[in-house]
Amino acid sequence: MTTNHKSALVTGGGTGIGKAVAARLVSGGYDVTIVGRREDILRRTATELAEHGPGTVRIDVADMAASDAPEAVIASHVDAFGGINALVTAAAFYEPIPFLDTTAETWDATLHVALRGTVLAAAAAARHMVGAGGGRIVLFSSINGFHSEPDSADYSAAKFPNYDFSSTLAGAGGGNDGRAADCAAVALPANDAGDFQRAQHDDVPAHSDGSLRAVHEEGG
């Protein structure tokens, strides 16, 4: 399926902030793919979002921790809509772990979603945007990247680098001419880690005056 509308992909779009951003995009006329691990939640959310129209909603069940998932969900979106105009990386994983109990498995469970998945999805989206004349990539960080909470070393370590990566991405622009994609990184003013546990897959949305720059905003 292809459309003449702009399209966006939102990882972690089934719940929480990702869902809220997807709703705004759909109401603004974007055709949106929401990505998450839980098909039942994605289907329920898609039904709700469809009421926000005029944009359409499709789902893609995927775990962004998997090494091949970021490339696959971008490719599937492009096949469905003929391109991608915006990417919002809201997927995250948060489980409190006492630092002394940290293992390779617990560390990877968080960073593979919130950091590696974000970077790989941004790279995959930018490759399509370069050939289409541009796009918008929005990376979600967290206030935890600056003000860590107990038992959240892995989450903080995953979230802070999104700020630096946004600068790198904005400078590179995804292409040789530096104008492929604008990038914003946003730190959420969320101090209740329980919000992330309840949402399970979240964190998002946009910006742009047409110039290429990274925007770093820290909520109070």
Image (cartoon, grey):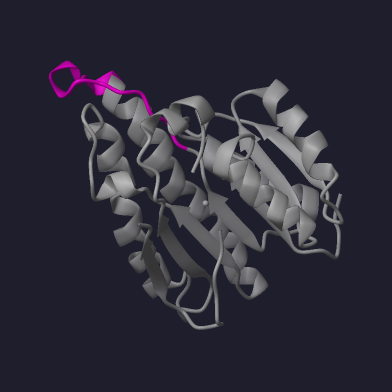
Q: Can you see residue 120?
A: yes
Q: Position of residue 143 (x, y in %)?
A: 33, 49
Closer to the camera in the image, 82 or 39: 39
Please give the name of the residue rendered at 40% of the width and 44% of the height, measured from the top-left corner. 190
Please give the name of the residue rendered at 58% of the width and 55% of the height, measured from the top-left corner. 87
Q: Position of residue 148 (x, y in %)?
A: 23, 40
Query: Which image quarter: residue 115?
Result: top left
Q: Is residue 54 magenta?
A: no
Where 207 falls versus 137 (above or below)?
A: below
Looking at the figure, which quarter contains the C terminus? bottom left
Q: Is residue 196 left or right of residue 5?
A: left
Query: Which image quarter: residue 113?
Result: top left
Where 78 falls versus 46 (above or below)?
A: below
Q: Is residue 182 left or right of residue 31?
A: left
Where 39 falls versus 82 (above or below)?
A: above
Label the magenta part by its dominant secondary structure. Answer: loop
Outermost residue to the front? 220
Closer to the camera in the image, 22 or 33: 22
Number of marks in picture: 0
Please give the name of the residue rendered at 64% of the width and 35% of the height, measured from the top-left corner. 14
Outermost residue to the left? 100
Q: Position of residue 219 (x, y in %)?
A: 38, 58
Q: Is residue 147 left or right of residue 30?
A: left
Query: Which image quarter: residue 7?
Result: bottom right
Q: Can you see residue 74?
A: no
Please give the name of the residue rendered at 63% of the width and 23% of the height, measured from the top-left corner. 38
Closer to the camera in the image, 176 or 50: 50
Outermost residue to the top? 101
Question: Which region shows up in magenta?
Answer: 92-105
Q: Position of residue 130 (x, y in %)?
A: 58, 70
